[in-house]
Image: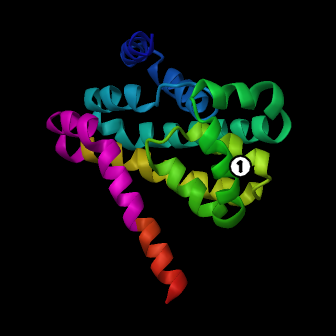
Amino acid sequence: MLRKLYDWVMGLAAHKRAQWILAIVAFAESSFFPIPPDAMLIPMTLANRKRAWRYAFICTVASVLGGMFGYAIGYLLFDSIGEPLVAFYGMEKGFETLKDWFAEYGLIIVFVAGFTPIPYKVFTISSGLTGLSFPIFVIGSIVSRGLRFLIVCGLIYWFGPPIKAFIERYLGLLTILATVLLVGGFVVLKYI
């Protein structure tokens, strides 16, 4: 089922209203939808590299707005909507640990979640449920989601079609590596 959904989203990248659909997918992915906007972002950017920065901007704005919706689900509707979403992604056990991490590392958690391929919706809902400062949540989301989409679009803008296979194959690994280095930097700064 997930593969069919992915293929459907990929097909939408060629639609005449693809930018609007991209915004909807980016919004939904930040709060409940399982397919990341990269499924549309990559083919759209490959088709028109001159619009790379526009597409990154659309994804960032829509993703942050979707994250705000996810925050509202966690803050206002966790029992009725948030909990079933967390269960759908099989994150029940990790969710309890995540709530504890939010108490200690709030902004860093949001930044890491927004930058990596980890399901961002779980973190947006957690942010609302734990009462993370809304301005901190929004700032972390803007920076992390913006960087993520700018990196994807920038790689395609500068390197063109050959980078597509590399992005699809290694983006998850590279973002996790970059995140580990970033968090390691924060830890080092904390103890210096």
What residue lies at 56% left-to-right and 41% top-to-bottom? 120
Look at the image and say whether residue 163 sits in the magenta stretch: yes
For residue 186, side relative to residue 157 (left or right): right
What residue lies at 38% left-to-right and 26% top-to-bottom? 39
Looking at the image, is 68 positioned above or below residue 106?
Answer: above
In the rendered image, the residue lying farthest to the bottom is: 192
Which residue carries the number 1 mark?
A: 127
Counting labels gives 1
In the rendered image, residue 169, in percent from the top left (x then y), is placed at: 24, 36
In the rendered image, residue 88, in percent from the top left (x then y), is placed at: 61, 24
What residue lies at 41% left-to-right and 59% top-to-bottom? 179
Most frequent secondary structure within the magenta stretch: helix
Q: Quadrant of residue 108?
A: bottom right
For residue 22, side relative to residue 66 (left or right): left
In the rendered image, residue 40, in percent from the top left (x then y), is placed at: 40, 25
Q: Nearer the viewer, residue 175 or 92?
A: 92
Looking at the image, is 128 positioned above or below residue 87?
Answer: below
The stretch in magenta equals 157-181
Q: Nearer the viewer, residue 44 or 151?
A: 151
Colour scheme of the picture: rainbow
